[in-house]
Amino acid sequence: MPDQSTPDAVSSPEAAAKGGFSRRRLLGTAGATGLALGATGGAAGYAAAPSAEKGAPAAPLTSLGSDVVMFHGKHQPGITTALQARGHLVAFDLAAGAGRKEAAALLRRWSATAQRLMAGEPAAQDDTDVARDAGPSSLTVTFGFGHSFFARTGLEKQRPVALDPLPDFSSDHLDKARSNGDLWVQIGANDALVAFHALRAVQKDAGSAARVRWQMNGFNRSPGATGRPMTARNLMGQIDGTRNPKPSESDFDRRVFVPAAGEPAWMANGSYAVVRRIRMLLDDWEKLSPAAQEDVIGRKKATGAPLGGGTENTPMDLDKTDADGNLVVPINAHARITRPDQNGGAAMLRRPFSFHDGIDTDGVPDAGLLFVCWQADPLRGFVPVQRKLDRGDALSTFVRHESSGLFAVPGGAATGEYVGQRLLEG
């Protein structure tokens, strides 16, 4: 992912003063992470470890543990939030007999729990203590609705046209049991136990109203692991996300979020998430020479720079040829095919997690990318790009799309609201 600001991360100067950290000291402690730093002192609940001596002041959290993302806001958290080190994606189906009333109660519970956990507080009921002693750690919990949700709740007339099923693609080898779902939850955090704590809380809150349809677990590089802020790498070793749209760009909101006056009204300031489990055929990929891998992608493996020269962010010269008249960036290179200017301006915000689920019975790694992309309209974002990739992407030989889902993610909940309230009580 590209380095980007995190507008929904907050910093508390008062907490910093109490914790005894100056901004300079905090930055030195954190290392060059590329993430916006959150509150540096003890937050509520689990924010500080218990003191070893009774009456002694609690030790302040490190910056990683104290980073806070706000639950309430214009947009849901977990979309423009900086990429986190750990993630869980989980889909639920409503239980037999559960409808709109039960769904509303569930989203109310989920929203209340997400708000507490993201603030570093324990769950209100039967907390498991898994995250005790840890701070919020940039935890985000994001909720969405699948196509089937609307028929289950009698809200078919409120189902967005943009939520129509994705078309079939030739690279698809989809497992229906691990695709789609009535409800979708994305959890991210920079601490594995904090992320797992939120996952268990969400699953427990589902109660008898919904059951897990599928769950996928992922990871990224930890903040501070590199000597400087940089775009993430995927399991192929490639820098991944160089051309992601950035919140600072003037057309970012138009590309990623449904406008406030958009249709349907309950999706105002929301977005659509396409979720794909993409298996990487790593044994085959790793047999290629570094130069061959670079030709497949169209970029230098070490730096992410275009094959035509420059740095990672140098504009790619698609017409440049070598001494023999061959295109420097091959015609079927992944980076060439996915460029917005090669797809009618189609763009999406990619925010993936890597995964590794062990070794298959044939001895190859079950590993790859939990691809999550965000856009104002998937028919203008993901679909045209994937169709183009389907017609001749050099990378397609080394990947396999094994599951898929499309979810409508409503705008953020205002204070006193729960996510989806405008749909479920409108």
Image (cartoon, rainbow, N blue to C red):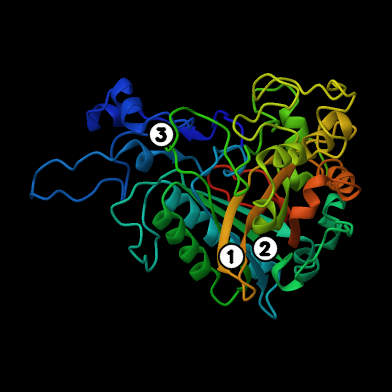
Quarter holding residue 11: top left
Look at the numbered disc 3 and give the secondary structure of its residue: loop
| Mark 2 crowd level (few <14, some 14–19, many ≥20, 10 Å Cα) | many
Mark 3: give few (<14), some (14-19) or many (20+) Cα within 10 Å: many
Q: Earlier in the sequence, mark 1 or mark 2?
A: 1
Does 16 sit left or right of 51 as displayed? right
In percent of width and height, residue 195 lies at 46, 55
Q: Earlier in the sequence, mark 1 or mark 3?
A: 3
| Residue 106 image label | 1
Image position, residue 36 (x, y; %): 47, 30
In the picture of the structure, the residue carrying the numbered disc 3 is 38
Q: Nearer the viewer, mark 1 or mark 3?
A: 3
- Give the spatial CA distance, label 2 vs label 3: 30 Å
Looking at the image, is 381 positioned above or below residue 215?
A: above
Residue 266 sits above or below residue 102 on the image:
above
Residue for badge 2:
183
Residue farthest along the bottom direction in this orientation = 96
Please state which amino acid type lies under the numbered disc 1: Leu
| Picture coordinates of residue 284, whole percent (x, y) | 70, 56
Q: Amino acid at mark 2?
A: Leu
The spot of residue 211 in percent (x, y) is 61, 74
In depth, the one of 201 and 274 nearer the eye is 274
Task: State if disc 2 and disc 1 touch (CB < 8 Å).
Answer: yes
Report the quarter where the N terminus lies. top right
Q: Residue at x 39, y 61 (%)?
A: 124
Q: Quadrant of residue 349?
A: top right
Residue 373, relative to residue 172: is it above or below? above
The crowd level at tag 1 (other Cα within 10 Å; few <14, some 14-19, many 20+) is many
Question: Is 14 left, or right, of 185 in this rendering?
Answer: left
Position of residue 25 in the picture relative to residue 284 (left or right): left
Q: Nearer the viewer, residue 293 or 107?
A: 293
